[in-house]
Image (spheres, rainbow, N blue to C red):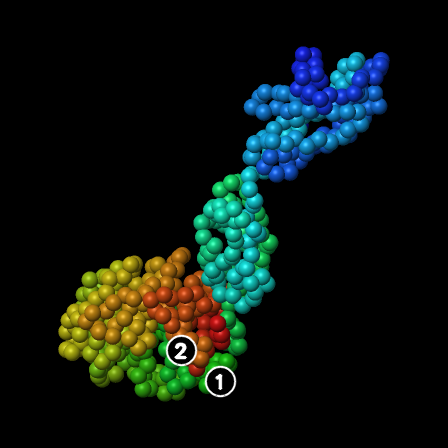
């Protein structure tokens, strides 16, 4: 740092030359006819907590010596005079962590000339911390999960307490300041990306030691596209799908009801379509029983379709109504259709050719999805959470149990005693082993518009659920349902709808195709 050269009164210079420097005063001045040239290139370098080294260039051959002036707390004083031709001086006995200003004055009997002023700050007392070391993950590590605990070791020779500034990222930035422990979690990392990090250790005396930069790489997202079926158009309206006997039955919204052969799992083949007028209304739910498909067809009613010849599906019977319906499930000769704010519609389908409306049932919330198991029904009741109904009398459901969720839920997927309920803020995991007392045991949070319907895959690589969180497909490890953890992700080229698990693969319904993916975490 440079400042204007200070102007020193003759009294100060004489004091420096005669009294302040004592026996170290310069030799007898030469008989010169002009003042000396000013020294240049003055530098001040801290050596430790008590000393600073000054260095300069001697630009004169006629000086009688140099006077070193130091300013502390706005007070200047001469601290040393030197003999001729001297170009350095070490100022000792200083206070740690203190800033001093210096100038050096060349002098002879004719006058003086001073260098620019420089500043320097002494270092702290004692010794600095050792460099942070022993990183985990080790430097250069690969195949890391998208949640990583960074840790390191460090010590201080003087036993001072330490805090740490942690720099982290693809381009490291200050991630945590003055952190008190030697480990920290980083999360929401991108798959197949390299991250760098380093740690600055600070002690209470003011020392800082910066450690080396370390790197690690997050493994890839775990998904591999192994096959696909292209619709041949953009704008798929896929809503729900089920698999029976190697065939995918797809409620394809405005595109009707489609069937795909997955006998060769990685090469889906289109078999046939049932459609009542292009864009007339949406097929919003599907269940298959024997050779019949039961379709919830929006405002067009419930259609029962013979799919024994998939290439030529034919209408067997239908029930007309004007209230919009969504999800559907079957049990005991009855169909149960979700009607959102209007609750459930119960239809007698014991004679498929002539289905008959049997009853309605009003739920506390908004009936969005339903799973029926014998005489028990599980309803995603929107803001009402999970509702459990007793269907011992099929046309007269009665409340059996319920579980409040942190936000509205809209789709259900069952896996043994667990139900995965997708909703506004993520996936709630609900234990329904005791249907009268369902319990939320875990939750995986998701932002944006919330996740799609969940698919479950249990294999040699563990227990995982999958869902669309547009624009990505997400895989979550649910081996411990109380602590679900991100396990992988896949970003398709186009808009995502929802996944379906079958034959050890994930069938992902995108806006222009069905993508077949394998997953290996």
Location of mark 1 (residue): 264
Question: Residue sitting at 53 percent across and 40 percent down?
Answer: 206
Residue 463, x across and y down, in percent = 40, 74
- Judging depth in this view, the residue of 336 and 74 nearest the camera is 74
Asked if one can make out residue 444 in the rendered structure from this viewpoint, the answer is yes
Quarter-of-image position of residue 295 = bottom left
| Quadrant of residue 126 within the rendered picture | top right
Quickly name the residue at label 2. 458
Task: Report helix, strand or loop for mark 2.
Answer: strand
Q: Is residue 458 left or right of residue 203?
A: left
Q: Is residue 495 above or below residue 81?
A: below
Give the residue displayed 48% in from the left and 74% down from the top. Answer: 519
Displayed quadrant of residue 360: bottom left
Q: Position of residue 45 (x, y in %)?
A: 66, 35
Q: Residues within 10 Å of mark 2 (few under 14, many from 20)?
A: some
Q: Is residue 176 above or below residue 228?
A: above
- Of residues 408 and 254, the one nearer the viewer is 408
| Residue 503: numbered disc | none
Q: Residue at x 41, y 72 (%)?
A: 464
Q: Is label 1 in contact with label 2 (beta carbons under 8 Å)?
A: no
C-alpha distance separating marks 1 and 2: 20 Å
Left or right of residue 82, residue 211 in this image: left
Seen in the image, is 389 located left or right of residue 136? left
Quick one: 17 or 303, which is closer to the camera?
17
- Name the N-terminal-most of marks 1 and 2: 1
| Residue at 21% across, 82% down | 332
């Amino acid at each position: 740092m440079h400042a204007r050269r200070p102007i020193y009164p003759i009294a100060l210079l004489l004091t420096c030359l005669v009294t302040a420097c004592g026996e170290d005063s310069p030799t007898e001045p030469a008989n010169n006819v002009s003042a000396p040239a000013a020294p240049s290139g003055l530098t001040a370098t801290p050596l430790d907590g008590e000393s600073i080294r000054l260095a300069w260039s001697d630009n004169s051959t006629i000086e009688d010596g140099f006077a070193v002036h130091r300013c502390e707390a706005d007070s200047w004083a001469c601290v040393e005079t030197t003999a001729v031709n001297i170009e350095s001086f070490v100022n000792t006995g200083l206070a740690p962590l203190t800033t001093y200003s210096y100038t050096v004055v060349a002098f002879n009997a004719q006058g003086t000339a001073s260098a620019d002023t420089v500043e320097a700050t002494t270092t702290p007392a004692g010794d600095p911390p050792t460099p942070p070391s022993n990183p985990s993950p080790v430097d250069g590590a690969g195949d890391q999960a998208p949640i990583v605990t960074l840790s390191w070791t460090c010590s201080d020779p003087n036993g001072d307490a330490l805090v740490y500034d942690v720099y982290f990222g693809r381009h490291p930035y200050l991630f945590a300041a003055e952190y008190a422990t030697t480990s920290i979690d980083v999360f929401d990392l991108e798959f197949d990306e390299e991250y760098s990090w380093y740690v600055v250790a600070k002690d209470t005396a003011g020392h800082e030691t910066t450690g080396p930069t370390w790197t690690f790489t997050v493994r890839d997202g775990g998904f591999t596209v192994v096959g696909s079926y292209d619709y041949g158009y953009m704008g798929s309206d896929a809503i729900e799908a089920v698999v029976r006997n190697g065939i995918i039955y797809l409620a394809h919204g405005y595109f009707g009801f489609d069937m795909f052969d997955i006998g060769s799992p990685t090469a889906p083949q289109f078999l046939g379509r049932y459609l009542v007028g292009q864009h007339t209304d949406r097929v919003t739910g599907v269940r298959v029983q024997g050779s019949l498909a039961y379709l919830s067809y929006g405002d067009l009613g419930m259609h029962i379709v013979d799919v024994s010849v998939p290439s030529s599906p034919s209408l067997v019977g239908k029930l007309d109504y004007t209230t919009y319906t969504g999800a559907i499930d079957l049990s005991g000769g009855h169909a149960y259709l979700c009607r959102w704010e209007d609750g459930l519609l119960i239809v007698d389908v014991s004679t498929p050719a002539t289905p008959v409306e049997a009853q309605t049932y009003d739920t506390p919330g908004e009936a969005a999805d339903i799973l029926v198991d014998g005489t028990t029904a599980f309803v995603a009741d929107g803001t009402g959470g999970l509702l459990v109904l007793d269907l011992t009398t099929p046309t007269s459901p009665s409340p059996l149990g319920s579980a409040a969720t942190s936000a509205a839920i809209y789709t259900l997927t069952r896996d043994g005693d667990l139900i995965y309920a997708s909703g506004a803020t993520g996936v709630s995991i609900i234990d329904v082993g005791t249907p009268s007392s369902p319990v939320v045991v875990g939750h995986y949070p998701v932002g944006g518009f919330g996740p799609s319907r969940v698919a479950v895959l249990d294999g040699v690589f563990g227990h995982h659920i999958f869902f669309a969180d547009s624009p990505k497909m997400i895989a979550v490890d649910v081996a411990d349902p109380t602590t679900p953890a991100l396990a992988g992700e896949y970003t398709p080229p186009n808009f995502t709808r929802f996944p379906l698990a079958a034959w050890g693969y994930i069938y992902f319904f995108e806006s222009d195709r069905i993508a077949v993916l394998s997953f290996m975490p």
